[in-house]
């Protein structure tokens, strides 16, 4: 029996003779009894996120997160436990002895089902089975093997199914976790969002245009004993005329002339996929329904990106909060996605780069924004829309903050007279910072800063800071402003006109609450 440090890489990850034509893999499929056996084996071996981390230790676990397995392989060299075997097989993507696999897993069924391959006395993974967890418990996720592990490069098949990654984690932390009846995981991929949705939604529908992704999502659901309605089709075609309380989607949003990888490229030019997800999705929302999407959009020469995305949102008639987190220049963007698909350094790399960059130049694209789009079907005559750039740190999970923001928007549909009657308090995480030179009597700047959620910092004037400082719940807004007018020796009516719009914004953003904890009545 070969030692772990001497074993070979999975044959599925050796470079193909022609990198542009990767070998086809069978669609994964297992009978119910085989899924049950696999689930039992994973559970018996304690194949969980925490257990694998404890097995590897901090250094090797951190290396594995960087797609390097050597520290972990060295640590597990002599470990013949069930957990170590599963870790080598799936987390390290190494060939392992058939005899050891057969001792733990239904080997023949997994080979027949396209999950494993075997040759002689060695077996290796064709599909990744990875532990995954949130605060409520543990899961397993099925997806295609991690490309680029230990620097091994191979071109991806066009139907590659992406596994756990930063984008899927971000969407999971943004998605509002309130109990609802019906949810849609649009572009489900490996099915990770469907797992989360099943925790708080009565019915979960998962769609994808990629049959291999649907097979993975189905296997993910079945491994975890979760019922998901899996449907094939592009965008909203599989759910025509249906309504949902929540749509969560990480669509194929890459901005390109077209593209060929189903997991990231929609086949639609530019940012049309992101636009259609938003515009068409709004009509699939029930009353009060939410759509939450990751998206990319183009920054076009001579056009404000906020106007571009704002035009999408305006068509929905929904309350909306759009947050741009990052902007990349076109060259940087192209390099990112060529690396992602393993095309960097391939025979066609230079030409793809040239064609993609030429397309950006021809269309006046100066940058590409990455961000989050959140919609709520409020039915309001005048929807509230905020479109902003916020590249700064936020506290994840942000879902409670997003849900609270839309609640505040809804409750703040009140006139100024009603606002003047509210009794307000300062949120627990907000502090007032006074910034100035040491020894100065008056500060140069007054800054209100949040220490939770969006972690905003807003500069305040003397009147605004004085107003916030007086919000202890005892006096209504109107009385505080009148008292400030007397102190500052200014006209009370004029001060109300200046302060009230800021009060609305501070309430909306969570700097202030009503005395009973609600932002408005």
Image (cartoon, rainbow, N blue to C red):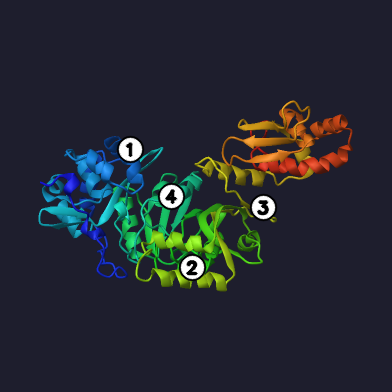
According to the picture, the residue beneath numbered tag 4 turns out to be: 166
Query: Mark 2 or mark 3: which is in front?
Result: 2
Per the model, the C-alpha gap separating discs 3 and 4 is 30 Å
Q: Position of residue 353 (x, y in %)?
A: 45, 68
Per the model, the C-alpha gap separating discs 2 and 3 is 31 Å
According to the picture, the residue beneath numbered tag 1 turns out to be: 59
Q: Determine whether the residue tagged by mark 3 lies in a helix, strand or loop.
A: loop
Q: Position of residue 303 (x, y in %)?
A: 65, 65
Query: In which quadrant of the rendered image does the C terminus lie?
Result: top right
Among numbered discs 3 and 4, the one appearing first in the sequence: 4
Q: Are marks 4 and 1 in contact (CB under 8 Å)?
A: no
Per the model, the C-alpha gap separating discs 3 and 1 is 47 Å
Locate residue 313 relative to residue 331 in the image: left or right.
right
Q: Are marks 1 and 2 in contact (CB under 8 Å)?
A: no
Give the quarter of the image for residue 283.
Answer: bottom right
Answer few, some or many: residues within 10 Å of disc 4's Cα (few below 14, many 20 plus, some between 14 and 19).
few
Among numbered discs 1 and 2, the one appearing first in the sequence: 1
What residue is drawn where x is 64% and y is 60%? Answer: 310
Q: Is residue 429 visible?
A: yes
According to the picture, the residue beneath numbered tag 2 turns out to be: 256
């Amino acid at each position: 029996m070969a030692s772990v440090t001497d074993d070979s890489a999975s044959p599925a990850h050796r470079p193909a003779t022609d990198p542009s034509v990767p070998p086809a893999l069978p669609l994964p499929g297992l009978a119910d009894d085989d899924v049950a056996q696999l689930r039992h084996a994973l559970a018996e071996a304690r194949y969980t996120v925490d257990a694998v981390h404890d097995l590897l230790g901090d250094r090797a676990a951190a290396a594995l997160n960087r797609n390097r397995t050597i520290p972990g392989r060295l640590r597990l060299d002599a470990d013949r436990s069930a957990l170590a075997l599963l870790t080598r097989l799936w987390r390290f993507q190494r060939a392992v002895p058939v005899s050891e696999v057969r001792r733990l897993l239904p080997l023949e069924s997994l080979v027949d089902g396209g999950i494993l391959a075997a040759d002689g006395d060695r077996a290796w993974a064709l599909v990744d089975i990875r532990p995954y967890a949130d605060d409520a418990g543990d899961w397993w996720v099925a997806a295609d093997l991690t490309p680029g592990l230990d620097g091994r490069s191979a071109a991806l098949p066009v139907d590659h199914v992406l596994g756990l990654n930063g984008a899927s984690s971000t969407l999971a932390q943004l998605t509002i976790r309130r109990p609802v009846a019906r949810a849609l995981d649009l572009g489900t991929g490996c099915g990770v969002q469907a797992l989360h949705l099943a925790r708080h939604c009565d019915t979960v529908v998962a769609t994808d245009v990629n049959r291999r992704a649907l097979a993975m999502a189905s296997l993910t659901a079945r491994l975890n004993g979760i019922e998901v309605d899996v449907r094939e089709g592009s965008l909203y075609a599989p759910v025509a005329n249906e309504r949902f309380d929540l749509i969560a989607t990480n669509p194929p949003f890459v901005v390109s002339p077209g593209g060929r990888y189903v997991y990231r490229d929609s086949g639609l030019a530019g940012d049309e996929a992101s636009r259609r997800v938003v515009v068409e999705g709004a009509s699939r929302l029930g009353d009060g329904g939410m759509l939450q999407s990751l998206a990319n959009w183009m920054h076009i020469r001579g056009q404000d990106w906020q106007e571009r995305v704002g035009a999408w949102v305006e068509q929905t008639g929904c309350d909306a909060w759009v947050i741009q987190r990052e902007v990349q220049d076109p060259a940087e963007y192209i390099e990112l996605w060529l690396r992602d698909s393993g095309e960097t350094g391939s025979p066609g790399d230079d030409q793809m780069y040239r064609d993609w960059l030429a397309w950006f130049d021809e269309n006046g694209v100066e940058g590409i924004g990455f961000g989050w789009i959140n919609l709520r079907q409020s039915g309001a005559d005048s929807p509230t829309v905020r479109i902003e750039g916020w590249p700064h740190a936020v506290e994840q999970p942000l879902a409670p903050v997003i849900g609270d923001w839309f609640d505040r928007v809804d409750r703040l549909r009140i006139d100024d007279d009603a606002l003047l009657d509210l009794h307000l308090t300062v949120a627990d995480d907000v502090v007032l910072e006074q910034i100035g030179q040491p020894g100065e009597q008056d500060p140069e700047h007054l800054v209100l800063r949040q220490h939770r959620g969006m972690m905003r910092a807003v500069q305040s004037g003397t009147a605004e800071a004085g107003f916030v400082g007086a919000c202890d719940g005892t006096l209504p807004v109107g009385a505080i402003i009148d008292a400030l007018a007397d102190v500052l020796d200014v006209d009370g009516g004029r001060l109300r006109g200046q302060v009230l719009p800021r009060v609305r914004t501070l309430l909306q953003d969570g700097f202030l609450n009503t005395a009973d904890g609600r932002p408005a009545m």
